[in-house]
């Protein structure tokens, strides 16, 4: 009878954690980080056929209205030097705790529980951030309650940190 090797015992928890977290999205809706504006429009046609790119903060933004997790949302594709750099999804004009829970449930079904969930206060209000972290993508679900009664619920998909070089190899 074979016994598990030490390497197998050491790798098993890491593999289990990755399986529980779900597959790395490697971008958003099949569009990989670094895809050009033309590639994203072609990949998501016909939804983006009528979307006109705009310039913002030195980059290009392509936005569409779409249903995400059953909610009416605005999806903004951000490009730096014609390369997809992040996707921001906002729910409606004013976010609600219920919208946060809808997004959280959809992401948890698809990717497993978030890697982190933190709540804090700042000079401008309170915030809650849930984060799913993958090798190529970080998904952040945010709920900000700002002073003055403004509430924002949104998702940010962005590239994950590049792997650290391993000098020991």
Image (spheres, helix red, strand yellow):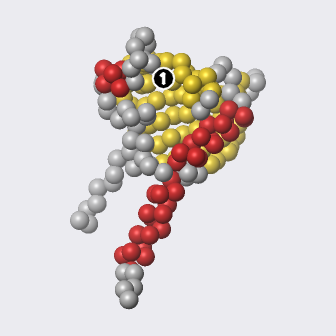
Whether residue 127 is visible:
no
In the visual, does 119 lie left or right of 115?
A: right
Pinpoint residue 160: horizontal percent, then vertical percent.
Answer: 41, 44
The residue closer to the viewer here, 163 or 107, is: 107
| Residue shown at 42% from the left, 47% from the top | 24
Q: Provide the residue designation for mark 1.
A: 76
Pinpoint residue 108: horizontal percent, then vertical percent.
Answer: 59, 47
| Residue shown at 32% from the left, 32% from the top | 34
Q: Vertical placement of 169 versus 120: above or below?
A: below
Q: Which quarter of the rendering shows the C terminus?
A: bottom left
Residue lying at the far right in this picture: please name it. Answer: 149
Q: Which quarter of the rendering shows the N terminus?
A: bottom left
Q: Residues within 10 Å of mark 1 (few under 14, many from 20)?
A: some
Q: How many marks?
A: 1
Q: Vertical placement of 126 versus 19: above or below?
A: above
In which quadrant of the rendered view does residue 36 lie? top left
């Amino acid at each position: 009878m074979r016994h598990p090797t030490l390497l197998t015992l050491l790798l098993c928890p890491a593999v289990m954690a990755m399986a529980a977290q779900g597959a790395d999205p490697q971008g958003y809706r099949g569009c990989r980080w670094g895809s050009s504006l033309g590639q994203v429009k072609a990949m998501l046609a016909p939804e983006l056929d009528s979307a006109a790119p705009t310039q913002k903060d030195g980059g290009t933004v392509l936005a569409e209205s779409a249903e995400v997790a059953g909610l009416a949302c605005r999806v903004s594709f951000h490009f730096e030097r014609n390369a997809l750099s992040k996707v921001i999804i906002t729910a409606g004009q004013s976010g609600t705790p219920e919208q946060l829970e809808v997004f959280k449930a959809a992401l948890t079904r698809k990717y497993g529980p978030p890697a982190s969930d933190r709540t804090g206060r700042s000079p401008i209000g309170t915030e809650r951030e849930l984060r799913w972290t993958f090798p190529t993508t970080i998904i952040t679900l945010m709920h900000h309650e700002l002073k003055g009664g403004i509430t924002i619920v949104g998702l940010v998909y962005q590239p994950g940190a590049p792997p650290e070089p391993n000098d020991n190899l």
